[in-house]
Image (tube, rainbow, N blue to C red):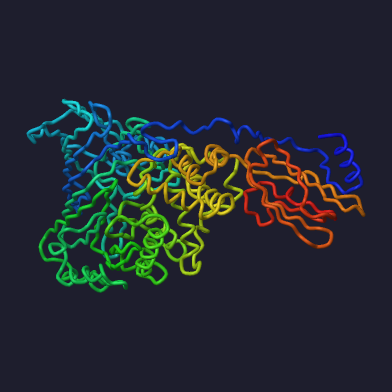
Amino acid sequence: MNRIFIALTFVLFSEGTSAQPQAPAKSKYIPSDLFAASSFLPAGNSYRSATGEPGPAYWQNRADYKIDVSLDDKTEIITGTETITYSNNSPNTLSFLWIQMDQNVYKKHSKGLDSKLFLTSNTQDSKYGEGFAIESVAVKNGKGTLSDTRYTIYDTRMKIELAEPLPAGQQLSFQIKYNYKFPRNFKNADFNVNRTDILPTKNGDIYSVAQWYPRLCVLDDVSGWNTLPYLGNGEFYLEYGNFDVNITLPSVYIVEASGDLMNPEEVLTPAQLERWNKAKTSDKKVYIRTVEEVTDPASRPSKPFCTWKFKLTSARDFAWTASKAFVWEGIGIALPGGKKVLGSSLYPAESKLTESWERSGEYIKFTLQYFSQQWYEYPYNKAVNVASNLDGMEYPGLVFCAAKDKGNMYWAVVNHELGHTWFPMIVGSNERRYAWMDEGLNTFIDNIATRDFNSGEFKGYPEIDIATAGLFADSLPSIMTRPDVMPGNEVYTVQYQKVAYVLSLLREHILSKEQFDFALRKYIRDWAYKHPTPWDFFSSINNSTGEDLNWFWKSMFLENYKLDQKIANVTNPVKGQSAKAQIVIENMEKAAMPLLIEITFENGSKEFHNLPVEIWEQGYSYTFTPDSNGAITKVAIDPKGIFPDIAIANNVWSSK
């Protein structure tokens, strides 16, 4: 700066009005921390491209399941025989396989129970579950003959040793015979494990059946075998494949499941079969089984047992439900691409309320159509919504929602659980490590849908959301924290609400809706039925938007940085001078965001400035002048409160 300019500045502003803090606080902001020359994102390779796309040599393994299972409703024991065909698409020869044994989390002194201190030493042994009882594990040889193989169980994982290693590009089949006693009532704020349970109702129990079969762990190019134990907060990471499932129960039970029902004529009465077929093409709900028929023995086949046969393709999991108490309704849903989907709702008579389960079909229809139009078409042939005593849990083509919920909360849970079709059922991220990649992204798209549903009838999650300032509390971990490393009562705040909030900032105030939506759609298409990492997501959005958003990912996701933009100084021109005021803004905390400024002049006119985040690349202090000459009476940072400033008291300056 030359001496003439310095002198001129002194003359113009020395007699003006200024705001001088008595004890200026020291800024914590370091520009190079957010705007580094080198990226924290990994370099691309042949498996995962630097553009955030799968690379030319990307691979993932595959697990196809054929399962015969029965439920003994007297003993509440599930017995199954599964044959798994495992395809090794990796470049490695495998000498062992890792299997997920999630039912073992209910056993006394499981890592999940002990680590969450869920049950005390005074708890009766009958409270604990028994986990999987394995009868046999046998591998098929080249002639199709089964031979028992050695296996070892470690908490919620089982290692199967292969007598003959599985070469790259080959597949093998093996059989597991197992049973387990159905767990009941495992629920605690710090031990969120009740993803399978039994709901008593006046007409019979409702079984929500999940994590009910041993499942392959994922082998990937990032971590090798993903064998983190099932502790409760961290959900699932699963291989894709096809499911062929046969479920046998007493014929008084109605059964629904993730897959397509292949033998309806064998398990439904003639009247139910007619209604079931009608529902698939009806744009209004059809009762397949009415409230009045629930207690009528004629509403079920007279034979002692029924075997319900289901098939599901290209899915990462399979769940099912069974009850004598079900009211069952269906509705046909036309997707934007022309495909017809059956919306299936099952609930007890006591949940048939106008502000609750009577709107299930309406909510299913809107959610599937909206997300299919906005992001990616719904992939399954049906969507099942089951009333349960679970707060909400998602599986391919089937969700469990709370039988008790009403009003806003019922809408929010149904929309959210069905929204999981896109994250993680289509985009198969690692929930065990990165819960935000499905919960947060899903909550984000849910919030968009909620604003558009029925002219804004509902408001998201006011019952459980906290104030925005609380999302950046010092006590909270970063979004990238593993869910099992944080208390259960913080998981929603960090992994759901905060992610949805900051992504909304990115979509609506940092980028544009068009820019962001294009990028998110491409990310979904690129990673449909694949396994992206957080780095793939960050790189994908960067490349599709044409913006280096590493400052955003670093401050909002990798760290729990806070934002504090402060009006440090306002200097008005000398009275009578036709000159501009000067405004100094300081960035006091470690996060950076665009700067929104509203300026009010002495004559009553106003200016609004939307300054990009790049103003913070060279330091914590930014000085600028308005477009118009004249004295200023008021300056306000972010007057609408868009960005998460933690100290709004220093966001306004007034000459009065």
Image location of residue 583, percent across then percent down:
78, 47
**Image quadrant in which you'd find residue 392:** bottom left
Q: Is residue 383 left or right of residue 633?
A: left
Image location of residue 162, percent across then percent down:
19, 27
- Viewer-nearest residue: 456 or 611: 611
Image location of residue 592, percent across then percent down:
63, 42
Q: Is residue 277 above or below residue 488?
A: below
Quadrant where the C terminus sits is bottom right
Task: Please report the residue visible at 16 percent of the width from the left and 54 percent of the height from the top.
Answer: 248
Q: Is residue 469 above or below residue 119?
A: below
Task: Please report the residue visible at 19 percent of the width from the left and 50 percent of the height from the top.
Answer: 245
Quadrant where the N terminus sits is top right
Q: Is residue 440 above or below residue 335?
A: above
Task: Please report the residue visible at 61 percent of the width from the left and 33 percent of the height from the top.
Answer: 33
Q: Is residue 514 left or right of residue 577?
A: left
Q: Could one spot residue 344 in this view of the protein?
A: no
- Viewer-nearest residue: 174 or 576: 576
Image location of residue 130, percent across then percent down:
26, 40
- Viewer-nearest residue: 469 or 387: 469
